[in-house]
């Protein structure tokens, strides 16, 4: 796969996440439960992923579940918090503000992960350019919240 195709994967995934927030928020109004709509979202995703495991012949990959460090399972927790946070925030502050805030949170934590080499990544210094970029994202969030 070329670098462009690898860049397109998160681009498409990110676009789908932006659509996921209002779709889940609408489901929340229908069900009357933010956690219920999050559960439905994850069940649909689980069914899709289980099907993909079977179709690709990778179902055996689940045999080691439970034999890994507890930190290996935090992704599910992070995803659940993200889905609930976005479905609650998007009807109140708008989808754009919700995702600029989400991106700001992602980039701030990513910069800290890079800076300190957490989770086994190589440490990358926090340059003034990175700090400025983070500041500009936060300024954009403030401007969006003021305009909305």
Image (cartoon, helix red, strand yellow):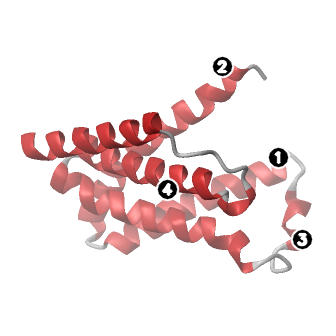
Residue drawn at the location 39% of the way across and 72% of the way down = 36
Badge nearest the viewer, 3 or 1: 3
Residue 80, percent across and down? 49, 67
Mark 4: few/some/many CA within 10 Å (<14, 14-19, 20+): few
- Using residue 8 as the reference point, say whether residue 98 is left or right of it: left
Q: Secondary structure at mark 1?
A: helix
The image shows residue 63, relative to residue 138, as above or below, that is below
Q: CA distance from mark 2 to mark 3?
A: 34 Å
Q: CA distance from mark 2 to mark 1?
A: 26 Å
- Specify which label sits upstream in the sequence, 4 or 2: 2
Residue 135 location, quadrant: top left
Q: CA distance from mark 3 to mark 1?
A: 17 Å
Mark 1: few/some/many CA within 10 Å (<14, 14-19, 20+): few
Per the rendering, the mark at residue 55 is: 1
Q: Secondary structure at mark 2?
A: helix
Per the rendering, the mark at residue 4 is: 2
- Specify which label sits upstream in the sequence, 4 or 1: 1
Pointer 3 residue: 63
Q: Secondary structure at mark 4?
A: helix
Residue 34 location, quadrant: bottom left
Pointer 4 residue: 109
Residue 32, percent across and down? 25, 72
Residue drawn at the location 34% of the way across and 45% of the way down = 99
Q: CA distance from mark 4 to mark 2?
A: 25 Å
Residue drawn at the location 42% of the way across and 60% of the way down = 83
Quadrant where the C terminus sits is: top left
- Using residue 90 as the reference point, say whether residue 145 is left or right of it: left
- Using residue 81 as the reference point, say whether residue 118 is left or right of it: right
Residue furthest left in the image? 147
The image shows residue 107, relative to residue 80, as above or below, that is above
């Amino acid at each position: 796969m070329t670098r462009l195709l690898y860049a397109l994967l998160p681009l498409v995934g990110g676009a789908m996440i932006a659509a996921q927030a209002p779709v889940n928020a609408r489901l929340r109004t229908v069900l009357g439960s933010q956690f219920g709509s999050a559960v439905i979202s994850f069940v649909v995703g689980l069914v899709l992923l289980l099907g993909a495991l079977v179709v690709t012949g990778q179902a055996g990959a689940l045999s080691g579940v439970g034999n890994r460090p507890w930190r290996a399972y935090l992704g599910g927790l992070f995803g659940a918090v993200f889905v609930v946070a976005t479905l609650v925030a998007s009807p109140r502050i708008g989808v754009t503000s919700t995702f600029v805030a989400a991106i700001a949170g992602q980039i701030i934590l990513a910069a800290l992960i890079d800076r300190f080499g957490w989770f086994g990544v190589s440490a990358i210094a926090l340059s003034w350019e990175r700090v400025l970029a983070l500041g500009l994202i936060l300024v954009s969030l403030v401007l969006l919240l003021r305009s909305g």
